[in-house]
Image (cartoon, rainbow, N blue to C red):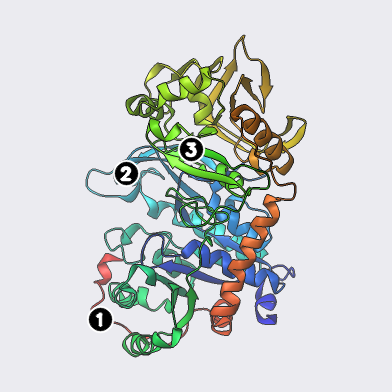
């Protein structure tokens, strides 16, 4: 490990730390998990390490202590590295608002909405004179400056790519995969999900679709989610090395529930996805059933991870009113489209079902966009530009969307317990007469709660107090376990990721790549693509 520490900038020498880019053959190949695992493995060895993702497209985000918005995956990777997350770790965040446009968050602050064509470039794209409208190429300088700052202050920086580096239609303006690798001189390890099948073809095809200049940075492969006897894989790994001249430096086994906070997809990331793991037996005599409305553009659905971590709590995502029938708690999660979510709830019949629940005194919780939807009225000339829209009318709240986004890390008290959270929203809530009691800067009326605070349920004492009230209102003999500590469970999860790397990867080879950079003499794999495409 002394080689990395000697190169790092933490000793005041001003030299750069080592670096590595983790790319993938596809989206969801395991880049985030491998990046987090390498960060935790290095941190346990005493290496000062930081994660980095130049550009992230996600509706799951987090607020740093300085008030910057970054992807939740990078915040969790920072936790794996045992460092405080910062905007430097995710300089560009794209938050989809529709199939064709996204909010662009630059260095933690929103700077406007941009169409996919305007951002990625293409016929009819705005002129290159404006920074954002020029597409991603204009952001390469900002991205590399952030990476260089992290390399000056850390012994190693582990970068995560996005999608696949072989997306040749986007290569000219790439700042997150091979564009970043070449600009920063990084070696690249490509991760492939063997559980999907075709991993050898994916490794070979990914490499062969890159230009000669890009291929020079592809140094090795990592197989993810392997089931069975590794010896059966070895002939294929040897052939892959013969064909590409590149080794496989890890075969990571398939394991349930090893994901970190997801970028996209309906997944509860802690204690396994709810679709993958068995719920632990209840501490008391009964279970508690929680239904999360799978609204469009759902954001920060990781809020329910802490609920899923409780023994005896069953969390599921729903999109039909009949699925609410046996639910003890209904959660309306955050969304990047509150007005669109309201339309969806009404179209599906869920709005009426939720109103009936509230009238019967059955618990409902709204978080951020879900809280806004529970109110009386929404005035939105910012997000949907729909003007004034009626809410569900279950909380005495009026919401006005402001151009400036609220980004905060509040601390407060509710149900007699200390609570920490974070806020990410354009909607400004005005509490009207009729609110029975305040609730985390929101309010509560009967069995309906609403708050803008994400992450509040990660506060152990508050979560237990809240679940006790839910159980009482639902008539369930459910008792929260007194020893469930969400922070410790998350640490255990990150340690498991570190174990994956330490036990199933060639850590010596990874260290050499991080310390020494791009290996010399890596062969070209034909056919490649013309240099003009890069």
The residue that appears at 26% across and 65% down in the rendered structure is: 533
Dot 3 and dot 2 residues touching (CB under 8 Å):
no
The first of marks 1 and 2 along the sequence is: 2
Residue for badge 3? 292
Q: Nearer the viewer, mark 3 or mark 2?
A: 3
The residue that appears at 46% across and 65% down in the rendered structure is: 30
Q: Compute the Cα span from label 3 to label 2.
A: 34 Å
Q: Compute the Cα span from label 3 to label 1.
A: 49 Å
Residue for badge 2? 118
The first of marks 3 and 2 along the sequence is: 2
Residue for badge 1? 526
Residue 232: image x %, image y %? 39, 86
Q: Is residue 155 visible?
A: no
478 vs 429, left or right, is right
Query: Is the residue marked by circle 3 packed among few (<14), some (14-19), or many (20+) residues within 10 Å?
Result: many
84 vs 259, left or right, is right
Q: Which mark is residue 449?
A: none
């Amino acid at each position: 490990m002394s080689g990395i520490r000697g190169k790092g900038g933490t000793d005041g020498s001003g030299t750069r730390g080592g670096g590595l880019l983790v790319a993938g053959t596809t989206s969801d190949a395991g880049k985030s998990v491998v990046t987090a695992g390498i960060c935790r493995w290095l941190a346990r060895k005493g290496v000062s390490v930081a994660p980095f993702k130049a550009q992230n497209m996600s509706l799951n985000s987090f607020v740093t202590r300085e008030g910057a918005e970054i992807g939740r995956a990078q915040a969790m990777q920072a936790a794996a590295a045992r460092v405080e997350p910062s905007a430097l770790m995710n300089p560009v965040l794209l938050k989809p608002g529709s199939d064709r446009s996204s909010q662009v968050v630059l260095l933690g602050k929103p700077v406007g909405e941009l169409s996919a064509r305007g951002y990625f470039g293409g016929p009819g794209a705005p002129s290159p004179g404006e920074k954002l409208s020029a597409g991603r190429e204009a952001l390469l300088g900002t991205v590399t400056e952030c990476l260089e700052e992290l390399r000056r202050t850390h012994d190693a920086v582990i970068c995560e790519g996005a999608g696949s580096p072989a997306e040749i239609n986007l290569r000219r303006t790439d700042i997150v995969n091979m564009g970043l690798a070449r600009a920063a001189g990084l070696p690249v390890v490509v991760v492939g999900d063997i559980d999907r099948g075709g991993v050898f073809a994916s490794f070979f095809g990914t490499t062969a679709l890159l230009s000669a200049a890009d291929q020079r940075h592809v140094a090795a492969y990592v197989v993810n989610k392997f089931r069975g006897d590794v010896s059966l894989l070895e002939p294929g790994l040897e052939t892959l090395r013969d064909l590409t001249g590149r080794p496989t430096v890890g075969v990571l086994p398939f394991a349930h529930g090893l994901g970190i906070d997801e970028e996209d997809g309906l997944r509860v990331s802690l204690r396994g996805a709810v679709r993958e793991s068995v719920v632990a037996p209840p501490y008391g005599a009964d279970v508690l059933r929680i239904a999360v409305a799978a609204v469009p553009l759902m954001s920060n659905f990781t809020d329910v991870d802490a609920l899923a971590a409780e023994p005896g709590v069953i969390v599921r995502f729903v999109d039909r009113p009949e699925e609410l029938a046996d639910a003890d708690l209904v959660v309306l999660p955050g969304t990047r489209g509150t007005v669109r979510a309201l339309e969806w709830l009404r179209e599906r019949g869920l709005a009426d079902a939720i109103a009936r629940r509230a009238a019967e005194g059955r618990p409902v919780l709204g978080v951020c966009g879900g809280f806004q939807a529970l109110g009386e009225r929404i005035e939105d000339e910012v997000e949907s530009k729909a003007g004034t829209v009626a809410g569900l009318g279950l909380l005495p709240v009026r919401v006005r969307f402001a151009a400036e986004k609220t980004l905060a890390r509040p601390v407060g008290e509710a149900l007699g317990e200390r609570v920490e959270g974070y806020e990410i929203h354009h909607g400004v809530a005005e509490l009207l007469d009729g609110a029975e009691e305040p609730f985390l800067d929101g309010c509560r009326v009967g069995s309906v709660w609403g708050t803008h605070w994400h992450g509040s349920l990660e506060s152990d004492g508050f979560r237990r107090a809240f679940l006790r009230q839910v159980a009482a209102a639902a008539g369930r003999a459910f008792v929260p376990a007194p020893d469930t500590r969400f922070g410790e469970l998350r640490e255990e999860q990150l340690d498991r990721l570190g174990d994956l790397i330490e036990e199933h990867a060639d850590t010596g080879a990874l260290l050499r790549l991080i310390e020494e950079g791009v290996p010399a003499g890596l062969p070209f794999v034909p056919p490649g693509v013309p240099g003009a495409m890069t």
